[in-house]
Every structure is written in structure tokens, then in C-alpha cells.
Image (tube, coloured by chain):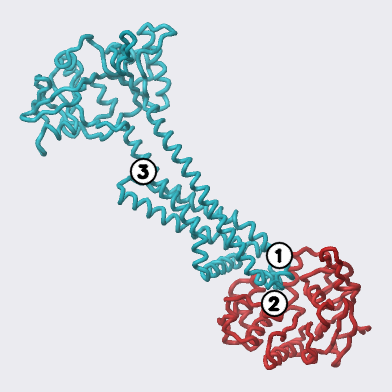
Amino acid sequence: MAAFVWLTIMTALRILGRNRLRAGLTMLGIVIGVGAVIAMVSIGEGAKRAVQAQIATMGTNVIIIFPGVTSASGVRGSQGSAVTLTVSDALELRKRIPLLTDTGWSRRDVMQIVYGNKNWNGPINGISPSYLTIRDWSFTSGGPFTQTDLDSAARVALLGQTIVENLFEPGEEPVGAVIRIKSVPFRVIGVLAPKGQSSQGSDQDDVILIPFSTAERKVFGTSFIGSVGAMFGSTDQVEDLPQAAEQIREVLRARHRLQTEQNDDFTIRTQVDIGKVQEGTSETLTMMLFAIASVSLLVGGIGIMNILLVSVTERTREIGVRMAVGAKRHHIMMQFLIEAMTLSLVGGVLGIALGIAGANLTTVIAGWPTIISGDVIVIAFFFSLVVGLFFGLYPANKAARLNPIEALRYE
Amino acid sequence: MSSLIECEDVWKVYRVGDVEVQALRGLSLTIERGEFVAIMGSSGSGKSTLMNMLGCLDQPTKGCYRLNGIEVGGLRPDELAGIRNQQIGFVFQSFNLIPRTSALENAQLPLFYRGLSLKDQRAQAAAALGRVGLHGREDHYPTQLSGGQQQRVAIARALVTSPSLLLADEPTGNLDSQSSREIMGILEALNRDEGITIILVTHEVDVAAYTAREIVIHDGQIRSDRWTKARPPSSQVEVEI
């Protein structure tokens, strides 16, 4: 049996080798189909990974709570314009909800920053110390605020990369320098590691962090002491995010004395919500890929079936001879199935090579990140085998059911 | 021990559209081991149908055909294929070699379906090619061989399984007279020296002259069955005409 299979494969390869052009054209459908799928999955994976990395820059397992909107005579302000969230809300959440490992808060405003003869307009973010851990900021030099800085409303600042680039000469060390924010001198005590773009496309490195108390008392001039621009919470597990969000909602509604018919005067967003939007996009992409793959494999398979039917007709006499010298039905069947699978497998392998080349070319030419996953290659290989088997069945069966007498007489 | 071939009241009826064609009409025939038989008859006489049946490519509609004591009638296609592989060698008028496949591989073909190891297949096929005088031409392709040589490859393919019956359907029909004589010489020698039973379909009298027994088929029945040479000693049964 092993000798039979081996010889059949060799025979199949030789028959295909004889009709190279025909075999090549037959395989083209599979080659292009598999190639397109591999290339597009690689591009899709690359994009997905980039988006995931962006979402991860928000921090790990983060919940963000924005204040609601103001409403003056029915005219609504922009999101976050109301001053419904306070520092005590954040502290209360921390106390009441065990799921939350930490809570933080911040308030931001765009202001002019001056250093030496340079100036820059950038967002000043007054933050609680826990903000740094929740949002996962790290440092390229210097270090974070301390609780003492917060308590004493110290004039210290952490600079994002974009700020550093715009205020300092290349190579100049910002830590220790004194900058002025709205004429108030601040000592730089740390430089933040770059995060790049956020998932919404804004530059996350264009930021200056100062202690919340300092911002409130010395820079922003707040009319409502303790009101915050946003609150942050984090959980241990991603799975806890929805439950934590629900609990936050309940606590805040109770604290804000909202009646059941009243809407929330705040908005809760979790990292999961933000990820879902992206997942929806990639799901659409996956469905499209699946559709393309199905159609091209179908077309490729029909091509193989077509050429095999031609082959069966052309070789009717040969089949008759083989039957006359003792080939049983399964022998003939195997021969054509192996030919079909050889065609589709060679096509699949060429397609995989084409797909990898296409993905790499995309990275080189368009600069898009691509990730070639081993899974996809294995699946593509397996699928091309199945296509050969499936579309080979009909011609192989047709060959095996030939009447040897008629086959021998066939001209 | 039974005879090699025993046909008893064999009928073969085809249906072509609404017309019923009786290709064989109650034919009875016995052939012993070691015989060299010519089957003759005009086209449409039923001789091809008879050959197909003797070769287990076809089965009788009615009646009984036993090859080596095995009743062929009720066998399934795969069982027939097995019998063809084990017992029968075919030689065709148009050689029917597999194109673009070497002489050796053509001669190997029946062994391929026996599931022999590749090494044994090659050795036995090479030996068979040697027996028909094609030693050294193992790697030639059919297109590189003359008609006579191609037919010899076909004979080697038929011989390679050591069949109990060799069926030759107009083996010289596509050959010039020189090649025809060579091929008939080989068949005659195989029958004489190795005792292989050969049944040969022909309509050429000088080809039939090589054989020892001449059966003429007409309208699906045996018209005449006569010995043209002395019967081989292994033949014990009287043949009634």
C-alpha cells in the first residue's frame, strides 16, 4: 500500500509536470486565493496589534469617569463641562468598592508654558499621585510626585516627550530645570516615557503633569474646590471592569442624590468599551476575509475540478488499460484524488509564499506593520488540501465508475 | 481438476435504446490449459463480446462462465479486477501502452496494483521485458519504440503476472508483416515453451495458422471449432462441434 501511494504521488507529479502551463493555470485560483488571505490576515493582525498597543497605553484595566454636561436654559455644554465629580467622590469610590484597586483624578487646562526663550501651549494636567500608576506612565528620567508634593501643593512638574522637544534643546536635561506655567515657576522633577498616539489619534505625550492641589490652588483658579475633570479607577482583572463600572454608577448616583427618572450626571467608560469598538472593526475585516477566502477557494476548487474532468476524459483509455490489468475502483479513485490534492497543495504552498511576500512588501512599501501568524499558514495549508479532496471527489468517482470495455474502446 | 475455461449456454444481451441485441446466444465452450486458440469471425459476430467475457471485463447475462473453476457470473467489479490482475494478461490491437511512461513502468503496471514492493515490481518487469527481447530498452518511451517493440512491451505487461490466460485481441492488426511474424513467433514460443494458454482474436488466416485450434463465431454462436494441429497432450476433453 505504501508503495502504491508513493508511486501514485510520483505519477501524479509527473503528469502535472508534463502539463506545466495547464497545471499552473489551474492552481492559479488557489495560489491567488490563499496568497490574498495570508497577506490580508497579516496586515489585519498587524493593525490589530497596533491598536491593542494603543489601547494598552491608557493603562491596564482602566475605568474613566467624566462629569456630565451643564445645561443652562436647555443649552447643553460640552462633555465634562459640568462640575459634578469631586475628589471626595473618588475617595468614596475607593472606600466603598473593593473591586477597585485604586482611584485617581485629574483636571486639565491648556496653558502657556515658558522655558528660557521658548514657549509652548499645552495641556496642564493636575493629577493625584495614583494617576501615574493607573494610567501606566513610566519615566525616562527623574521620578513621580510624592504624597508630600500633593499635600503641600508643591510647584513640581512632569513633562511629556512632546513638551520636552518643544521647550528644550536636543540633549538638554530637563530634570532640575525651572519652567513657568502661567507665570508660576515649576521645577521639573521627571520626564515621562513616550506613549505615542492614543486610540483616538491624539498625542498622549503632549502633556505636563503637576500635583492636583497645586493646579487647583496656584494655576487654574477653580471656583469649585475639589471638582475634577475626570476620575480614574483600576481593577485587578479585566473581567471585573463591567461590574466595577456598575458599582461606581450606583455609588455616584446615590452620592449625587439622583432620582430614578433622572439621567446620570456622569459618563463611565472602561477600557473594554473602547476595545470593543476596535474589535467590531476587526470582526468586520475578518468576515470580509472569510468571504474572500471562501470565494477564491471555491473558484480555485472549481478550476481543479474542471481540469480533472478534462483529464479523466483525455485519459479514458489509460483508465481502461489500468482497469484491464487489475486496477480496482479505489485505485483509480486514489490516483485522481492524489492528483487533485497535489494540485491544490502545490497551489496552497505557492499561495502561502505569495502571501508572505505580499505582507513583507506591504511593510516595506507602505510601512504598515504586518504579522504573519503560523496558525493562518497551517489553516491555509489544511484548507487547500480539503479543497483538492472535495473538488477531486467528483472527477475521481467519475473515473472509477468507467466501464472498462467502453474505456478501452474510447477514441 | 476443472478446465481452464468453461462456458455453458452463455448469453449476452445488450439493450441499445429500444432494440435488444443478442451478442452471444447460448454459446458453450471449453478450453484446456496450454491451448493456443484462435477465435475468428466477422465484425458483429460476437467475438469481441466473447473476448471481453473471457477476459472478465464483462459478465454473461445468462449462463455460466467458469475461469479456473471460479464462477465469474455474480462477481462485483472489484472482484473481477482482482481476477484480471491474478489470472489474465491482455494484449490489444492498439498496444494501449500508457503514453509518456517508460517501457519498464508500463510492464510494471499490473504488479503496481498487486501492491508489490517497488524493487520487486522493477525486477519482475525487467525480467518480462527480457523474455520478449527488449532487454536494454527499459527506459524507452512508447514514442521511441517501433510498433512491434510497443506490442512486445504490451506482451511483457501481460506476462509479468504469470497469468493462466493470455488474451490477444488482434495483436498484429496494427503491425507490418515483419513485425507481425515476430509477435506471433513470441506468442507461439510462449505457448510451446512455457505452456501459457493463449486465446487470440483475429480475422487474418495466416495469423490463425500459428494456432492449434480455430473457433469461428457467427451470430453469437460457434459455427465451427476445429483442430488445425495436433492437440497438446494436456487436452483430455473431446470437443463436440
Quick one: SS at disc 2?
loop
| Residue B114 in view (yes/no) | no
Separation (CA) of disc 2 from disc 1: 24 Å
Coordinates of residue A406 in the picture (x, y in percent): 73, 69
Residue A398 falls left or right of residue A167? right
Q: Report the quarter where the C terminus of chain B lies.
A: bottom right
Task: Tell me the number on the disc at residue A402.
Answer: 1
Q: Residue at x 65, y 62 (%)?
A: A333
**Residue under label 3:** A46
Q: Report the quarter where the N terminus of chain B lies.
A: bottom right
Quick one: SS at disc 3?
helix
Q: Find chain B in the image and tell me its colour.
A: red
The quadrant holding residue B19 is: bottom right
The quadrant holding residue A215 is: top left
**Residue under label 2:** B161
Residue B87 falls left or right of residue A189? right
